[in-house]
Image (cartoon, helix red, strand yellow):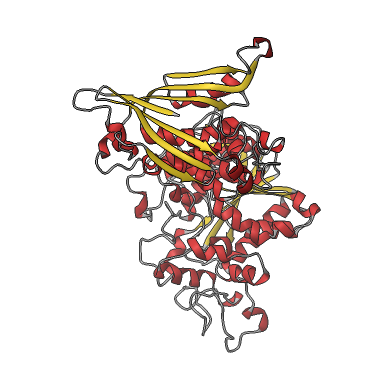
Amino acid sequence: MTISTTGSPGRPATDLGSLLHKHPDRAQTYHTAHGTAHVLYPEASAERCTAALLLEIDPVALVRRGKGKGKGRGGAPDAALASYVNDRPYAASSLLAVALSTVFKSAMRGDCKAMPERAANPLPLRIEVPAVAAGGGAELVARLFEPLGWATVEASPVALDERFPAWGESRYVQLVLEGESRLSDALRQLYVLLPVLDGAKHYWVAPDEVDKLLRAGEGWLAEHPEQKLITSRYLARRWSLTRQAMELLELVRLAEAEEVEVEAIDNAVAGPTAESADGDLAADVAADLVGGAEAEAYAPAEAAVRAEADVRVAPDAGTGSGGRAEAPAGAVAGTGTAVPVPGAGPAEREEPSLAVRRREAILTALRDADASTVLDLGCGEGQLVRELLRDPRFTRVTGVDVSVRALTIAGRRLGLDRMGERQAARLTLTQGSLMYTDKRLGGYDAAVLSEVVEHVDPPRLPALEYAVFGAARPGTVVVTTPNVEYNVRWETLPAGHVRHGDHRFEWTRAEFRAWAGAVAGRYGYGVTYAPVGPDDPEVGPPTQMAVFTRVSDRRDGAGATTASPTPVSASVSASTTGRTGATEAMDATGGTDVAGRRTT
């Protein structure tokens, strides 16, 4: 393979040597697992410089190191037929891609301390690969490289034998790429696309290949029109790895669209503690004690609020003398566990937490609606999904969340790998964003948005409203959200603060009803309201719930992107300052994933 560039006054072409970290005056040799790589410069002047990478493959080493990998997924197709006589030493494949990453590692990362500006900016490049194994021919080469901005993409078929034209063309092409590109981008594209064109790898494709793909594809793969084909071929058509990579790439795409870091979107799980959830009974009980899917790593003050919110309160002792919900004497802070209270009976000591009450209220609403197929939008780690699966009346349950980590943990909690075939057929866990319409979400009897809306920036609420009420249009929609008025009952929550740092707002009862009434009117739903938790006579319940029932086929014209006339409480998280977002509901090609997640 050769890489050429041209120079200009003040920027000699020999700068290519600095960018590649290979001096033009010396030929260099590197040993690889399957042969020897040579780097040399056929020409090196101020006007034009060419670097060549020559890879000598040792067929014996290829067979010995790849023993058992010449057949099946990930093996070179010709090696299965002839272990010692094949095309690997003569055609660019995953062997050349690995040599690229080994010899030009720093250049692929874009590192160049001597010329950082030169490395960060495009330069005129011409790349030639004399023989590329291309299973899809010249047409596939064009589909892969033209969307990347190359001015010239040439893929000239190589004849099987020039002496016998009647034999036709081989599956190999001579590849020429020409255009303006950063050197690091060009090398990373070749690292991914050479084995994609070949359709095979000389080594077994393990799960760490997903990380390699994402690193090499940064900045271009998430938006590539052939993303699915590239991902599948690079990962040797291993379905589980391909699905994982596609989900992560969707997060990257959403993050780029929102101009935020991926971690800001995939934040439904609070780090390492969530990884300990293995789906056993003890983990489930612990989750219920601290609020299930809503549990996160809070600041100390927020943790104290959580302890008060989920403490088990005697039914008749919902408020103390000052109207404040009181924990039973001896309650353990942060656990929601109460010790016996003098005069309290066994039933009082077993009163469920607020998180459990919330799930019970949702299940009751779904049963009353006679729903059998249910969407849990913002399913988090799957606590509500687990309860739905326990009731056979719910024949189809789909949990949706934007967080890959949350969905992975939900799968562990629910024991997907141990679940029987009939039970598994009832369950789907999928990634999606409520900022976009998604055809996969249509046709359900009911949908649940439990502790989700308060995590959405107010300007983006119309997009969520249309995606759920205008596009998906389930027969019933259950929405729960905190009641900001009840916050005064938390002694450890400073005045004016919301219950969780990710809350964009928290509504009063009047504000919630105004929003719900407006949404119901626009989309043809009726709405009723119910308290969740102890209903304080002065400030109401800690959680408020609305149950929407579809009464007409109205979809608000073409899109219902009008701003919702929703008064927003003054108790808005400081993190919303300066935040903006598109308010239009957008169609997502192929289906995308849920921005809402329950962390209240």
Report the front residue among 504 and 418.
418
Taking the spot 47% from the left edge, 51% from the top edge, the residue there is 455
Report the front residue among 217 and 593.
217
Which quadrant of the rendered structure holds the N terminus?
top left
Q: Quick check: 465 above or below 499? A: above
Q: Is residue 132 left or right of residue 488?
A: right
- For residue 132, say whether it is visible: yes
Taking the spot 38% from the left edge, 42% from the top edge, the residue there is 109
- For residue 583, say whether it is visible: no
Q: Position of residue 437 (x, y in %)?
A: 57, 35
Q: Position of residue 250 (x, y in %)?
A: 53, 40
Q: How many marks?
A: 0
Q: Residue furthest bottom?
A: 342
Q: Position of residue 422 (x, y in %)?
A: 80, 52
Q: Quick check: 380 above or below 521? A: below
Q: Residue furthest right?
A: 422
Taking the spot 57% from the left edge, 30% from the top edge, the residue there is 197
Q: Residue furthest left?
A: 10
Q: Position of residue 458 (x, y in %)?
A: 43, 44
